[in-house]
């Protein structure tokens, strides 16, 4: 009887299984069909893209960082670019890659190159052999370069090569345009070194031990445009004659003077870097030039003043070239800097800067005099100057001046007249004294920024300024103002009122403020606000209406940022909030920042405090919810322990009342 009843069940189960298998198979067929159709359509719609991608993979191959000890065999003959850098290859044998154009073997242990290694590489244009052991087997290895007549780019830097070794490697590279020899052991450059490389455009010999450059070494290289001799041991340049070079880097040598003999030939030099040297005299550049960028930072210029440094340079130039007469006595013309756009004189020994010393530089746009010993900015040899003379010496294109980190207390009253288009003035880390009183006119004993219509960016950080009153900036439409580091500064009534319609960036960091003057107007334009390193407990009302994008609140006394719940700037993108004593369990504002997709840049460094009874603990703000959940649980547990006795008491009372009524009814 049992067997009869189980048979229908088994048949039903088998039918269900068969139906499930059939359905699954049909779905698989449909899926495979759709996938095939998609692949077919994709291939049909973009055959060119697929072909190009395939060709790209065939033409370029990288074996970089594969711990190879030899070059892989059976490489595709169609390869055009082969990267074998950062391996341990010691030997280079014959390469049968006739289509190869670029080969990178840098950062290997290569010490032996077979003579015919490059024989078949008729299209090879670029080889990078930097950081190998090419100072071994130099004669044998250099023979491999005999057939590379089409080579245009060669990097053999960091191989400890001396003058003769370099000469052997590049002797037959007649088509060479780019040559890198950095970090080798060159000591003396002679005309024979590049005798066969007349097509050179760029030579980089930084960080060698070059002491001497013989006359005629580079002059015949008519296509030479960029020459880098930085980080060597050159002492002087007596007669600069490279009229074809546009970029010359002589930084980080020991150069004491740079002179060019007077001639009428046009020099194409546009960028001259003489930074980090021992220059005592101002460089004398070619009479006719196109110089735009002059880097003189970190030298010894101006120990006796800029004008004296210039005049001494000219006198020394006369002594060295006694047969050459210098007629013009005007400083700027003698310097031949009339086309200059940028000059960096930072980190020298300048004690005095004359407004007339760089006169007639009508194209000068940027002047950097930071980190000197400037105590005085003067009119030069004159104690007074009139408006006509100002226009004669003014710099009409100058828009940026950096006077940071000097000892300046005041600026001449006609300072801004010399720079009619000045937009950015950096005066941080000085001892600037702002004019006080009702009139607020500039004098030669204080500084006023009244009616400086061109000025847009002003940095007065760390000047020891004690107060700013409303008239200091009347008529000036600043976009950016830095007052940071002026500790205990007093922002008087209306001190910022002139910036309401223009100021977009304000920094009052590290002024030891806990509040702002109640009369400070609402700043409706700032996009960037920095109030870090102060004592604020809440965002000042003056900035609640600001359309901020960047807000820096670091290192204050904020326990929460609940002002964001009510006055959240709609355009806020970035915040810095670390080093504040936040309450771990008062962080609704943090959720708001998440929801508004505001980037809290230093959230991983922000911490909060948690207090439970007499215990205090510090946690990372990112993990604050864990501790608060514990607190909620503990608080809930305490309530339960209080409620349980109460409930038991009520229950006992109810039971007793019922018992009393029950007895009373029974008696009745």
Image (spheres, rainbow, N blue to C red):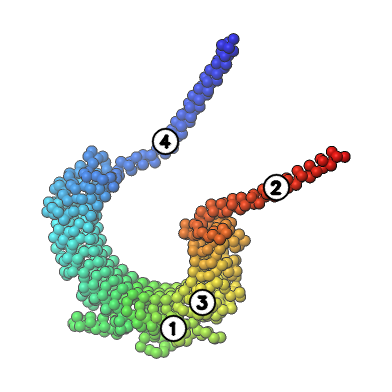
The disc placed on residue 647 is 2
Dot 2 or dot 1: first in sequence order is 1
Residue 369 occupies quadrant = bottom left
Q: Residue furthest left?
A: 139
Between the C-alphas of marks 4 and 3, the distance is 71 Å
Pointer 1 local density, CA inside 10 Å: few below 14, some 14–19, many at least 20: many
Between the C-alphas of marks 4 and 1, the distance is 74 Å
Between the C-alphas of marks 3 and 2, the distance is 60 Å
Pointer 2 local density, CA inside 10 Å: few below 14, some 14–19, many at least 20: few
Q: Are marks 2 and 1 in contact (CB under 8 Å)?
A: no
Q: Which residue is mark 4?
A: 43
Q: Which residue is mark 3?
A: 488
Q: Is the residue 38 above or below the residue 529 in the image?
A: above
Residue 217 occupies quadrant = bottom left
Secondary structure category for the residue under label 2:
helix
Q: Is the residue 246 above or below the residue 404 in the image?
A: above
């Amino acid at each position: 009887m049992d067997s009869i009843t189980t048979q229908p069940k088994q048949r039903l189960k088998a039918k269900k299984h068969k139906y499930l298998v059939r359905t699954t198979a049909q779905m698989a067929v449909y899926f495979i069909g759709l996938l095939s159709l998609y692949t077919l359509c994709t291939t049909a719609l973009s055959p060119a893209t697929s072909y190009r991608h395939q060709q790209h993979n065939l033409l370029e191959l990288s074996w970089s960082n594969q711990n190879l000890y030899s070059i892989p065999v059976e490489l595709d003959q169609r390869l055009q670019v082969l990267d074998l850098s950062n391996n341990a290859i010691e030997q280079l044998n014959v390469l049968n890659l006739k289509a190869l154009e670029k080969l990178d073997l840098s950062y290997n242990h290569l010490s032996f190159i077979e003579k015919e290694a490059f024989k078949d590489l008729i299209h090879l244009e670029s080889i990078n052999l930097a950081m190998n052991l090419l100072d071994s087997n130099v004669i044998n290895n250099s023979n491999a370069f005999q057939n590379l007549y089409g080579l245009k780019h060669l990097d053999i830097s960091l191989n400890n090569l001396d003058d003769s070794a370099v000469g052997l490697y590049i002797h037959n590279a007649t088509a060479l345009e780019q040559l890198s020899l950095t970090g080798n052991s060159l000591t003396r450059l002679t005309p024979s070194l590049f005798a066969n490389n007349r097509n050179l455009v760029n030579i980089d010999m930084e960080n060698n031990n070059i002491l001497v450059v013989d006359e005629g070494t580079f002059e015949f290289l008519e296509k030479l445009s960029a020459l880098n001799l930085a980080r060597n041991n050159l002492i002087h340049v007596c007669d600069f004659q490279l009229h074809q070079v546009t970029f010359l880097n002589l930084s980080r040598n020991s150069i004491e003077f740079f002179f060019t003999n007077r001639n009428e030939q046009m020099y194409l030099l546009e960028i001259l870097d003489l930074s980090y040297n021992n220059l005592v005299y101002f460089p004398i550049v070619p009479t006719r030039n196109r110089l735009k960028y002059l880097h003189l930072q970190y030298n010894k210029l101006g120990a006796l003043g800029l004008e004296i440094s210039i005049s001494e340079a000219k006198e020394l130039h006369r002594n060295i070239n006694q047969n050459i007469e210098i007629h013009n006595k005007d400083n700027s013309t003698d310097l031949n800097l009339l086309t200059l756009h940028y000059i960096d004189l930072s980190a020298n020994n300048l004690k005095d800067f004359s407004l007339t010393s760089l006169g007639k530089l009508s194209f000068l746009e940027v002047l950097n005099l930071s980190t000197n010993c400037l105590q005085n900015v003067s009119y030069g040899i004159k104690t007074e100057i009139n408006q006509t003379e100002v226009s004669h010496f003014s710099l009409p294109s100058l828009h940026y001046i950096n006077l940071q980190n000097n000892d300046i207390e005041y600026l001449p009253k006609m300072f801004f007249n010399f720079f009619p288009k000045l937009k950015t003035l950096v005066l941080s880390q000085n001892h600037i004294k702002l004019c006080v009183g009702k009139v607020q006119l500039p004098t030669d004993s204080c500084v006023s920024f009244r009616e400086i219509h061109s000025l847009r960016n002003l940095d007065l950080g760390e000047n020891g300024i004690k107060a700013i009153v409303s008239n200091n900036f009347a008529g000036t439409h600043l976009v950016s103002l830095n007052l940071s580091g002026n500790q205990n500064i007093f922002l008087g009534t209306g001190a910022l009122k002139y910036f309401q319609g223009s100021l977009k960036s304000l920094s009052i960091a590290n002024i030891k403020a806990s509040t702002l003057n109640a009369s400070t107007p609402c700043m409706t334009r700032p996009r960037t606000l920095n109030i870090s390193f102060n004592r604020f407990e809440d965002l000042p009302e003056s900035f609640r209406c600001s359309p901020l994008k960047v807000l820096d609140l670091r290192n204050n006394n904020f326990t929460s940022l609940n002002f964001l719940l009510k006055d959240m700037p709609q355009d806020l993108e970035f915040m810095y909030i670390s080093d504040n004593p936040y309450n771990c369990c008062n962080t609704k504002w943090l959720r708001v920042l998440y929801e508004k997709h505001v980037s809290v840049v230093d959230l991983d460094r922000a911490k909060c405090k948690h207090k439970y009874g007499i215990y205090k603990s510090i946690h990372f703000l990112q993990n604050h919810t864990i501790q608060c959940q514990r607190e909620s649980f503990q608080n809930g547990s305490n309530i339960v322990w209080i409620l349980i006795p109460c409930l038991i008491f009520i229950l006992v009372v109810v039971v007793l009342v019922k018992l009393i009524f029950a007895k009373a009814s029974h008696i009745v």
